[in-house]
Image (cartoon, helix red, strand yellow):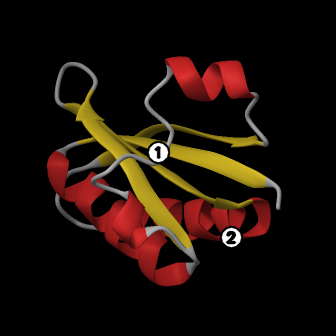
Amino acid sequence: MPMAVGVIETLSFPAILIAADTMVKAAAVSVVFYDKSESGRFFVAVRGQVAEVNRAVEAGLEAAEEQSHGGKIMSHYIVPNPPENVESVLPIHFTSKSEPFRL
């Protein structure tokens, strides 16, 4: 099955929390990574089938944009079928923490 990774970066924690919550509720995806990037920016990465990641990121962007907590979408990106060498180097693979929630 083709897997994808989708990432959303926002300015403010409430915006990324809203985006992550919406993504996992809107489609069959799992959060695989979350962290701070810089200057109050946060990002979250989800994994799942390509169509599900597309649906999740679209819903997450819409929810983060509509929130009224002063957050702002900084960037987003979807990578369909990331190669094995990318998965082994970047923190986008399923871990022991995310594996129980894998869909």
Position of the N terminus by quadrant: bottom right
Left or right of 24 in this view: 13? left
Q: Residues within 10 Å of mark 1 (few under 14, many from 20)?
A: many
Amino acid on which the number 2 mark rests in the picture: Glu
Q: CA distance from mark 1 to mark 2?
A: 15 Å
Badge 2 is on which residue?
52
Q: Residues within 10 Å of mark 2 (few under 14, many from 20)?
A: many
Amino acid on which the number 1 mark rests in the picture: Ile
Left or right of 12 in this view: 53? right
Q: Secondary structure at mark 2?
A: helix
- Circle on res. 23: none
Q: As rendered, which of 97 and 25 lies closer to the eye? A: 97
Q: As rendered, which of 43 and 15 lies closer to the eye? A: 43
Q: Nearer the viewer, mark 1 or mark 2?
A: 2
Q: Position of residue 34 (x, y in %)?
A: 30, 42
Q: Position of residue 43 (x, y in %)?
A: 35, 39
Left or right of 28 in this view: 32? left
Q: Position of residue 76 (x, y in %)?
A: 55, 40
Q: Which label's residue is closer to the chain start, 1 or 2?
A: 1
Q: Is residue 63 above or below residue 9?
A: below
Q: Position of residue 66 (x, y in %)?
A: 38, 69
Which residue is rendered at x = 52% and y = 17% of the image?
A: 89
Badge 1 is on which residue?
8
Using the rendered view, name the quadrant where residue 28 is placed: bottom right
Q: Secondary structure at mark 1?
A: strand
Which residue is rendered at x = 40% and y = 57% of the image?
A: 31
